[in-house]
Image (spheres, helix red, strand yellow):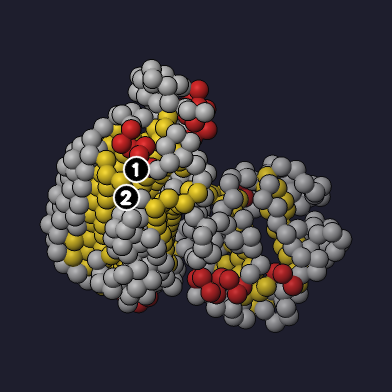
C-alpha cells in the first residue's frame, strides 16, 4: 500500500504518532513518509519531503548520509534503539543554512567524523532519546551560530579515531551557537583525549541533569565569550571533571538564587582524579556542589587553579557512580539504605557511650520473627565527633565513595533475619536491650503496631526514595513524629551534623 496520497492529507498514522511520541502537531498539509514502506531509503524520503513532513523509519539498519538545508523535517525511529543509522562514511545527517531538524529514537553510529552536524547560522537541531556511538570524532558537532538541543540521549565511545583533547561527545565551535544538553549520559570516550562536552569560541551552552563519565575532561570550555552553565550533573571516572581556560566563563554554581547552598547541585564521585581545573578562565564558579568529602585538604588537592567552590556540600551514597552499558540512565542501588548514629555535641560526662550489645531492628518487639535484628558488637563505643554507620552494602560504599569499612562500620546484611526497610513505610528501633526501646522512627503509612509508651503520635512524612530522616537530640524528646525531620536529598547528606541518629532510605 502506498501511504502517500496526492493531496498530502493522509493524517491517520501521524495522529497515532503524535499520541505515542509526543511530537509537535504537523504543519497544515504535512504528510508522513515511511521508510522503507513508501521509499527504500532515508535519502529518497528527504528528497521527496516538503517542509513540515515527518519521515518514519522502520526498525533495521541503514547506511546513508543526508543533508537538510532548508525547511522543517522530523525523523522518527519506528523501533527506538533498534533503528540503526550508519554513516556513509563521514556523518549520518548534516543540518546547514536554515534547516530545522528534529530526531527521535535513532542509533546513530560509525561515522568517520561526527554522527550529526549543525552547520548553518540559522539552522537548528533537536535530538531526543537517541544513541550516538562509535563515531570517530564527535557524537554531535555544532560549528555555526545555530541552536542545538539534546535531550535524554546516550553518547558513548565517540572518539574512536582521535587522541587529542578536542573530541568526544559534543563540540561547539562558533560565536552565537546556543545549546541545551539535558538528561544525557556521555560515557566511554576510549582514547586518552576524550572530552564529554566541549564548548568553544563564544558558544552559549547549558548542561543540566546529565551523567558524564570516563573522559579525560568531562567538560572543557575555552575561548573568550564562551559561557557554560552546569547544574545537577554527575561526574565519575574523569581525569578532570570540569576544565575551563582561555578566558571562558564557567558557571557550575552561584546561579543567582537566594540560597547559595543549592546553586550547582552537581555530584562529583571520588573516582574522578580532579574535580575542577581553571587553566585560565575569566570566571570559574562552583558553589553549592556535592563532593565525597568537604575537608579542606581533600578538596584543595582536587581543585586546581582559581575556583570558587564554597560552600561545598558533602555527599552520601544513593547510587553507584558507574552503570553497565548500554543503560542510559542511572538506577538506584538496591542496598543504598543506611542507618547512622552520631555523637557531635560536646557534652562532658555523657561520652563516650558503650553501645556494645545495643540492637537495631525493624520489629518493635525484637522478636526475631519475620523482621530483622542487628546486635552491635561488644566493645563498640562512640565518642564526641564520631559516628557509627550501618549499611547493607559496605563493599559498594567503599568502591564508589572511598568510605572504607572500619571498626565503626557494620554490615546489616549479616542480621538474621535481615533488616529490610520498606520504601513505602516501616519502623526502626534502637534499643540498649530486648526489654526497652531507647528511640524509634515510624515513617510512611501504618505498618506494625507499636507500644504507645514508645511512640505516642504520628508518623514521619514519607518523601520520595532518597530521603534522609534526622533525629536531633538537642530538642525535647516527645516520642512523636515531631522529633524527626524528613528531607529529600537525592543522594546528598546535609552539611550540618547533629547530635542524634539518622536513617537514609
Q: Is residue 394 visible in the rendered structure shown here?
A: yes
Label 1 residue SS: helix
At mark 2, the secondary structure is loop
Q: Residue at x 47, y 27 (%)?
A: 3
405 or 450, which is in the foreground?
Answer: 405
Please name whichever residue, 474 or 121, is drawn nearer the observer in this view of the structure. Answer: 121
Please name the residue shown 76% across and 52% down the image.
454
Report whether residue 180 is seen. Answer: no
Out of 193 and 137, give the one closest to the viewer: 137
In the image, is 3 to the left or to the right of 376? left
The front one of 280 and 417 is: 280
Marks counted in the figure total 2
> Can you give x and y, in whole percent of width and height, for residue 101 in the image?
31, 39
81 versus 408 height, above or below: above
The residue carrying pointer 2 sits among few (fewer than 14), some (14 to 19) or many (20 or more) residues within 10 Å by Cα, namely many
Q: Disc number at residue 30?
A: none
Residue 170 percent coordinates (x, y): 30, 56
- Cβ atoms at labels 2 and 1 below 8 Å apart: yes
Residue designated by label 1: 43
Residue at horizontal 33 percent and vertical 32 percent from the top: 49
Looking at the image, residue 170 lies above or below residue 120: below
Q: CA distance from mark 2 to mark 1?
A: 7 Å
From the top left corner, tell me how far across and down residue 501 is, in percent. Answer: 61, 62
Q: Earlier in the sequence, mark 2 or mark 1?
A: 1
Q: Residue at coordinates 46% horizontally, 22% vertically from top-left?
A: 11
Q: Compared to 324, does 128 lie above or below? A: above
Location of residue 361 (image quadrant):
bottom right
Mark number for residue 65? Answer: 2
Residue 317 horizontal/vertical position (percent): 53, 64
Q: Is 127 drawn above or below residue 23 in the view shown?
A: below
Amino acid at each position: 500500500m502506498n501511504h502517500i496520497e496526492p493531496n498530502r492529507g493522509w493524517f491517520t498514522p501521524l495522529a497515532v504518532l503524535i499520541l505515542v511520541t509526543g511530537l509537535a502537531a504537523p504543519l497544515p498539509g504535512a504528510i508522513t513518509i515511511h521508510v522503507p514502506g513508501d521509499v527504500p531509503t532515508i535519502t529518497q524520503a528527504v528528497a521527496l519531503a516538503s517542509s513540515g513532513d515527518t519521515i518514519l523509519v522502520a526498525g533495521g539498519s541503514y547506511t546513508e548520509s543526508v543533508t537538510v538545508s532548508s525547511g522543517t523535517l522530523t525523523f522518527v525511529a519506528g523501533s527506538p534503539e533498534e533503528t540503526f543509522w550508519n554513516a556513509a562514511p563521514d556523518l549520518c545527517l548534516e543540518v546547514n543554512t536554515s534547516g530545522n531538524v528534529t530526531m527521535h529514537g535513532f542509533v546513530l553510529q560509525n561515522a568517520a567524523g561526527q554522527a550529526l552536524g549543525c552547520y548553518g547560522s540559522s539552522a537548528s537541531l533537536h535530538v531526543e532519546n537517541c544513541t550516538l556511538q562509535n563515531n570517530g570524532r564527535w557524537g554531535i558537532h555544532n560549528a555555526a551560530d545555530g541552536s542545538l538541543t539534546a535531550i535524554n540521549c546516550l553518547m558513548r565511545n565517540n572518539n574512536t579515531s582521535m587522541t587529542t583533547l578536542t573530541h568526544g561527545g559534543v563540540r561547539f565551535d562558533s560565536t552565537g551557537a546556543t545549546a541545551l544538553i539535558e538528561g544525557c549520559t556521555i560515557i566511554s570516550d576510549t582514547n586518552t583525549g576524550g572530552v564529554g562536552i566541549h564548548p568553544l569560541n563564544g558558544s552559549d551552552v547549558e548542561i543540566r541533569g546529565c551523567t558524564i563519565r570516563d573522559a579525560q575532561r568531562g567538560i572543557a570550555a575555552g575561548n573568550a565569550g564562551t559561557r557554560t552553565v552546569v547544574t545537577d550533573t554527575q561526574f565519575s571516572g574523569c581525569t578532570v571533571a570540569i576544565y575551563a581556560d582561555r578566558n571562558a566563563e564557567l558557571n557550575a554554581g552561584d546561579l543567582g538564587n537566594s540560597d547559595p547552598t543549592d546553586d550547582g547541585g552537581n555530584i562529583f564521585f571520588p573516582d574522578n582524579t580532579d574535580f575542577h581545573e581553571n587553566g585560565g578562565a575569566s570566571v570559574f564558579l562552583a558553589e553549592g556542589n556535592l563532593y565525597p568529602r568537604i575537608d579542606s585538604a581533600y578538596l584543595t588537592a582536587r581543585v586546581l587553579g582559581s575556583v570558587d567552590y564554597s560552600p561545598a556540600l558533602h555527599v552520601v551514597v544513593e547510587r553507584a557512580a558507574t552503570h553497565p552499558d548500554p543503560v542510559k540512565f542511572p538506577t538506584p542501588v538496591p542496598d543504598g539504605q543506611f542507618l547512622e548514629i552520631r555523637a557531635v555535641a560536646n557534652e562532658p560526662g555523657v561520652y563516650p557511650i558503650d553501645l556494645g550489645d545495643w540492637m537495631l531492628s525493624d520489629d518493635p518487639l525484637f522478636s526475631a520473627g519475620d523482621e530483622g535484628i542487628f546486635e552491635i558488637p561488644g566493645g563498640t563505643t562512640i565518642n564526641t565527633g564520631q559516628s557509627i554507620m550501618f549499611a547493607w552494602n559496605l563493599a559498594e560504599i567503599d568502591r564508589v565513595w572511598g568510605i572504607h569499612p572500619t571498626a565503626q562500620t557494620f554490615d546489616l546484611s549479616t542480621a538474621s533475619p535481615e533488616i529490610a526497610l520498606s520504601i513505602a513505610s516501616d519502623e526502626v528501633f534502637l534499643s540498649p536491650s530486648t526489654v526497652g526501646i531507647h528511640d524509634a522512627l515510624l515513617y510512611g503509612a501504618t505498618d506494625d503496631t507499636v507500644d504507645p509508651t514508645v511512640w505516642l503520635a504520628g508518623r514521619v512524612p514519607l518523601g520520595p526514595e532518597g530521603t534522609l530522616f534526622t533525629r536531633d537530640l538537642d530538642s525535647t524528646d516527645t516520642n512523636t513524629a515531631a522529633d524527626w525531620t524528613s528531607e529529600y536529598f537525592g543522594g546528598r547528606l546535609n552539611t550540618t551534623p547533629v547530635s542524634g541518629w539518622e536513617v537514609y532510605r
